[in-house]
Amino acid sequence: MVTGRMVEESDKDPIELDGGSVNTVDRFPYLGSLIAESGRMDVDVDRRVAQASRAFGALRKAIFLDKNLSLTTKRMLYNACVLSVLFYGAECWVPLRKHTRKLNTFHHRCIRTILGISNRQQWSERITMSDVRKRWGDEETAGEKVKKRRLEWLGHVARMPDHRIPKTALFGWLPQARPRCGPRKRWRDVIRRDLKDIEVEESEWYREARRSRAGWRGMYRQGMESHREAEIVQAAAVSKDVVCEVCSRCFRRESDKKRHKCLREREKPVSEQRGAAQCLQCQRWFKSRGGLTVHTCRPGD
């Protein structure tokens, strides 16, 4: 594998050896993770979600949809058999917002399936994902679980001897300046953001993590709880001044109101609903342009 900004096509030529040739690849699995030549983790996250989805599907009918099992038992099996597959190696990830959204989407879809809450029921009863997680018995999102694993691994690296490679890589630096045009995010940058969220100074975390494992665990867990409560208070303080004139539903932004279809609007025929789109070939109506986009037209039907 060849990676970097200055890679040329000649650098990807096969390497000839006595026993044959070694070809260039754009990705390969290593210790359970999928490494791509771009250095990004898109393919690894997609692979993890696919593997966790297969694990969830294998236990869906026998375990998660079994009404004779308690919710506590299902939650323990879900954490052991599904989340362990999803978050394998997540301590070393450098996730972007799109990766966190993808993990949260999969996690929420799984717990909704176990609780028996459909998308239509969630919309009609206005059940937020925070309420779904409360019913589930675990209010942490997938992004928060990854953050907790990352901070736990940070304390483990801090307690390593100085000659260990992970500790050398964390505290090491290169004399060259970072490249221009938006340098890629590093693991250290993610850690700095995590420490800022839990309100721990960079000069304090190392001393606390070196002192004791239990003390560091209590510090970052308490900081995550305080950060979650602050986000809840901040979200509740946001004013909802945009109101639908038909159903009196409140929104935070005018754009949300424009996309909103109240019950009276949905009772109309599809062709008369706001935002409806029609296929010009088969004359079929769709509730939104998104439905028309994924529509495969079959004129013969």
Image (cartoon, helix red, strand yellow):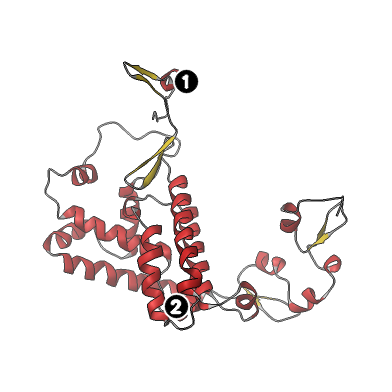
Instruction: State the mark number for residue 65.
Output: none
Secondary structure category for the residue under label 1: helix
Quadrant hosting residue 277: bottom right
| Label 2: few (<14), some (14–19) or many (≥20) C-alpha neighbours in 10 Å | some
Q: Determine contact: label 2, label 1, CB under 8 Å.
A: no
**Residue 169 image-quadrant placement:** top left
**Image point (87%, 53%), residue name:** 282
Depicted 9 relative to depicted 142: above or below: above
Residue visible at 14% across and 51% down in the picture: 160
Q: Confirm whether residue 138 shows in the render.
A: no
Which residue is at the front of the view, 22 or 269?
22
User: Does residue 38 appear in the picture of this structure?
Assistant: yes
- Image: 225 above or below 255: below
Q: Is residue 248 left or right of residue 102?
A: right
Task: Give SS at disc 2.
Answer: helix
Determine whether 135 is above or below 161 in the image.
Answer: below
Q: In the rendered structure, which amino acid carries the disc numbered 2?
A: Trp
Q: Nearer the viewer, residue 180 or 56?
A: 56
Q: Using the image, tell me which numbered label, if any, was put on residue 9.
A: 1
> Would you name the residue on which mark 2 appears?
136
Location of the C terminus (image quadrant) = bottom right
Residue sitting at 35 percent across and 52 percent down?
190
Q: At which x and y percent is residue 204? A: 19, 60
Of labels 2 and 1, earlier in sequence is: 1
Q: Percent x, y for residue 127?
A: 57, 78
